Image (cartoon, rainbow, N blue to C red):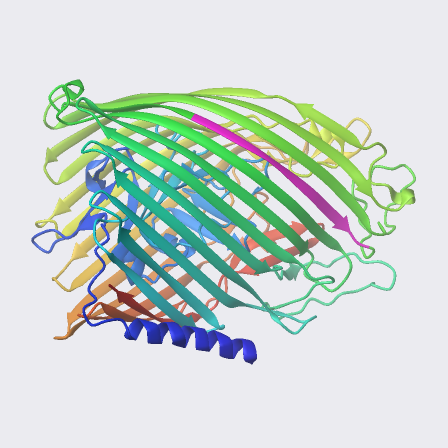
Amino acid sequence: MQQGARRIALAASVSALVFSMPAFAQEAGAPQPQAADANNGLEDIIVTATRRAERSQSIPVAITAIGGDQLKAAAATNLQALTKAVVGVQFDADGGQKSELAIRGIFTNRFDIGSNPSSGVYVDDVYQPRFADVFSGLVDVSRVEVLRGPQGTLFGRNTIGGAVSIFTTDPGDSFEGYVSGGYGNRSLVDVRGAITTPISDTVSNRFAAGYRDRKGFMHDLTSGKSDGFSHLTVRDTFVAKLTDSLTFKLNGSYYRGNYDATLYDPIAGPLVLQGPQTSYTLDKDPWHGTYSYPGFNKVRNKQASGRLVWDADPMTITGIVSWVGYGLDIQQDYDGTDKDLFGYGAKARSDTYSGELRFSSNSDGFLSFGDRLKWVAGLYLFQDKGYENSDLYYGTGTTLALAEFNNPARVAGTPLQGAHKLVYLNSNLTSVALYGQGTFAITDKIGLTFGGRYTRDERKFTLRGDQASVPTFARLAVPYTFVAKPVDTSFDPKIGLEFKPNAGTLLYATFSQGFKGGGTQSTPGILSEAQVILRPEKVKAYEVGMKADFLDQHLRLNWAVFYNKYRDLQVRRSITLPNGVSISPSDNAATATTKGVELEVSARLTQQLRIDTSYAYLRGRFGEYRPSATTNYGGFDLPRAPSHRLNGSVNYDMPLGGADLSLRASYNYTSSFYFRADNLASQKQKAYGLADASATLKLHGGTSVQLWGRNLFDKKYASYLNSIASEVVATYGDRRTYGFTVTQNF
């Protein structure tokens, strides 16, 4: 009760502060990436997906851009809320450790130091090598760009699914900002704000911060408490215009995410127990969980970057340097019961450095040949250094004859008696890339795009396995150490043709290639497993599409048809060694294809009424995938690849004299899909739909009050499933949430 009272008091204090702002406060003057058309049509959103500022409707890329006003109207504070409005994209999270981002059916289910994501994530043009929790603290964001399909030429490695670029708000040349406070069910407290301070006519600074704290929905039967989380984000951005043509930007941020241990719901079994723990009855309430020991999940992310832009006569030269520091500490009971079965602990740290030198044509420069050639070229350097120490615990209640416990004295079906599988990974990756892309206007209506990127990855990693268990059931006959120095190279071309029959229509066709970097095993139990080195994944992508505005930009229709062919997919498979021991390493064991259709329609029916809809059809299948000598998953569905996704939203703005009322309602439908490649019925999510709504009252003095609700019909759906031996455990998406937010702009 005392904690809840403190939360309410904090929210009330912020709300009081908001309403007490001076009467001369006005709407924030921060620059926005979108501007309403003069005829009150659909707005143009300026994006940088082609590494230059252009209208999203004028570039031959499947992109969804979400501006700052849309973010506020949707009350979106994390990427899960955002992706409901993005066609062909699915995002779910399991605490702060796992953020599973799937674009057009391609996703990553490994998050350790030795792995690579399938879709790239960037914050202010800085690549995030591990985005486990980077989406949870979206504070002072000006826009989000989601690019669907491989982006190998301009974005590089690890974008075979697509890319997500998050841009924070830059300081303007006037004093302005905002402060907001919100409260919701499950004791939610959300406080955030930003302020721009001009230092001189050419120098300004913007400081932003946000704090979010909430109880979870899982009730722990052991302690009687609920799980929960807290997020803290702090960011500072400094911009100096050194000359009329030279601009410097310095950005630094810190994020802290603290989570209670994830409470898993055991949905399938039964478990095999021994001794006094001979049985366990599954709790039928999906919102109940328990554990045999308490845990935690702590994520830290720090970032610093510098950007220098020189607008020279023939071209613009951009230099970017950055550092990203990442830390993860986790202790987790994985079986979802109060029995001593399975546990996991890890400590991970990494430091990532990158530098990019980019050259791009100016429309009035002589290298653009009278604005007929738009081009960009650059050099990219990247280094990622880190370590991860893992401990997989097998408790006294298990009787599993796990193969990694390779000891002839071990008798199948006897307890492991507190055995630990200890794995230590050190990784050092250096990557160098050269890239270039240009679009030449053959005529006023026809353009040809050509480009390519050459990448060289050099990685050195050390894997060491050890043991901590009773001697009789020692996990390893001999502890191992494995050192490897793989080198991978890739050339990823792109070619495209575009046709503009009129000023409001673009037709395009593209072919491109991309690759996902190689890697190591996550927690190999024996040397033979550690020695399986992952090669890069490759993709060939074909796409045709159209972007068109009609009725004086009051109706917008975008569609894309794509076909992607993947090879050397990094998946898990079972291998039986000559000594009879079975291991399950990740390996380049599969091919796959994805094909589909995406449709986006937006209409401004009146000055007050806007409707947005999107639909995606996806067919993602394994071509060849043999996880073992006797098993073939060829033709099976790819994980997290629903065949149908439908999004829709309605926005209505109503003037009320001294205020404006904005009403918004949205619905998101996802058809059934599998969480794993084996397509087991126990790991299939049924189709579900989520409804959200918000009402925002904007007073002319700069104050706004918003009421919001998500998952209004309280639908239950799994956000993560995993199997541990004979048990399947699940975590679920948020239940119904609702609350209010008060904001004061000044």
Is 523 on the left-hand or right-hand side of 399? left
Say if the magenta span includes residue 386: yes
Say if the magenta span includes residue 421: no
489 up-or-down from 310: above or below: above
- State the image coordinates of residue 379 (x, y, percent, origin top left): 38, 22
- State the image coordinates of residue 658 (x, y, percent, origin top left): 14, 75
The residue sitting at 49% across, 59% down in the picture is: 231
Is 728 on the left-hand or right-hand side of 57? right
Frontmost residue, 47 versus 430: 430
- State the image coordinates of residue 422 (x, y, percent, origin top left): 75, 41
Frontmost residue, 512 versus 441: 441
- State the image coordinates of residue 404 (x, y, percent, origin top left): 78, 39
The residue sitting at 8% across, 49% down in the picture is: 552
The residue sitting at 35% across, 61% down in the picture is: 193
Q: Residue furthest front?
A: 200
In which quadrant of the rendered image does the N terminus lie? Answer: bottom right
Frontmost residue, 110 versus 202: 202
In which quadrant of the rendered image does the C terminus lie? Answer: bottom left
Q: Main secondary structure of the magenta part?
A: strand
Q: Is there any visible trace of residue 162 in the rendered image?
A: no
52 up-or-down from 287: above or below: above
225 up-or-down from 481: above or below: below
Frontmost residue, 711 versus 501: 711
Q: Which residues are magenta?
A: 381-395
Q: Is there any visible trace of residue 253 in the rendered image?
A: yes
